[in-house]
Image (cartoon, rainbow, N blue to C red):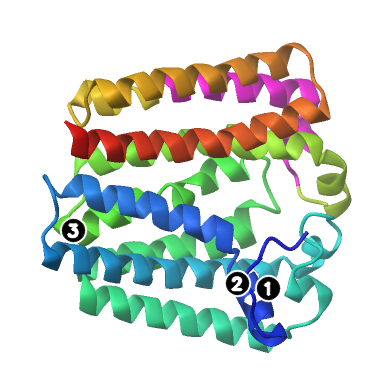
Amino acid sequence: MNTTSISLPPRLAQYYALTKPRVVQLIVFCALIGMVLAVPGLPTVEQLWRMLVASLGIWLVAAAAAAFNCLVEKTIDAKMKRTAWRPTAKGELSDVQALAFSAVLCVAGSIVLYEGTNALTMWLTFATFVGYAVVYTLLLKPNTPQNIVIGGASGAMPPVLGWAAMTGDVGPEALILFLIIFLWTPPHFWALALYRVEEYRKSGLPMLPVTHGNAYTRLQVLLYTLILFAAGLMPFVYGMSSWIYLVAAVLLGAGFCAYGYALWRAYSDALARRTFRFSIVYLSLLFAALLVDHYVL
């Protein structure tokens, strides 16, 4: 189903759909958290402008990666109900159009980041583009059931990019945020793969439920939620946050573990869907709690 609800002329709407808006919005949100946490206290006008420019640049490059992914996976997308609506899968946009669109966005985003933030942020963001669009999409996803684990490094980069945009370096705080998203990615995607297993089997992608079965995947989801629970406490342990974040991390982590345990004990597609949806809520609220904690205390 098309997830874009913005009202645009048909052709523009097709290009907009290639950017995977909801995914990119979450990426920019996580990057923004990295920017905010890198600035002690309230940001100055100059710092706010840098945050705005960095968010724009990151959005452009992330959208470019999404468009390239749609191009490369158009045949696979056409076989799966949740992605068959994409313009590349339906043949509404040609390969040349999609590739040119991705290239323009990537170049524009790189220029914005280089001129508006610093070279480190630009190169890290470009490396993230290559990691997702090339390493994950072309090499890992079609060849190994550990694609989500290894490829998760690219998806975990947004807070690092945000931190680098404001400070010009990569601190341990940014790496902690990276670790949280890195560990969140497998249970998030495997919950989806569990109830979409037949679609993945039909597409030929070696997702974990296809290659190792339902029971093994459920166990992996549970184990990752337990490890993620511990990682979620690290901002408090390291001194990045106070008790406001700690309470949120414990409650959200316990909730995700409860879903993982329930899924492991007794599987159903409905429960897998709820687990997938909660994983999105988990990450959004966890990072929102970091934001609130940063300004309240």
Residue drawn at point x = 57 percent, y = 56 percent: 136
In the figure, residue 288 lies in which quadrant? top left
Type of amino acid at the residue the image marks with label 1: Leu
Mark whose residue sits in front, 3 or 1:
3
Given contact means CB atoms under 8 Å apart, are the residues at marks 2 and 1 in contact?
Answer: yes
Q: Amino acid at mark 2?
A: Ala
CA–CA distance in space, label 3 to label 2: 27 Å
In-front residue for pair 96/150: 96
- Tell me the tag on residue 36: none
Which numbered circle lies on residue 71?
A: 1
The answer to whether residue 134 is above or below residue 288 is below
* Residue 32 vertical position relative to residue 240 in the rendered view, above or below: below
Quarter containing the C terminus: top left
Q: Which residue is mark 3?
A: 166
Q: Residues within 10 Å of mark 3 (few under 14, many from 20)?
A: many
**Numbered circle sitting on residue 67:** 2
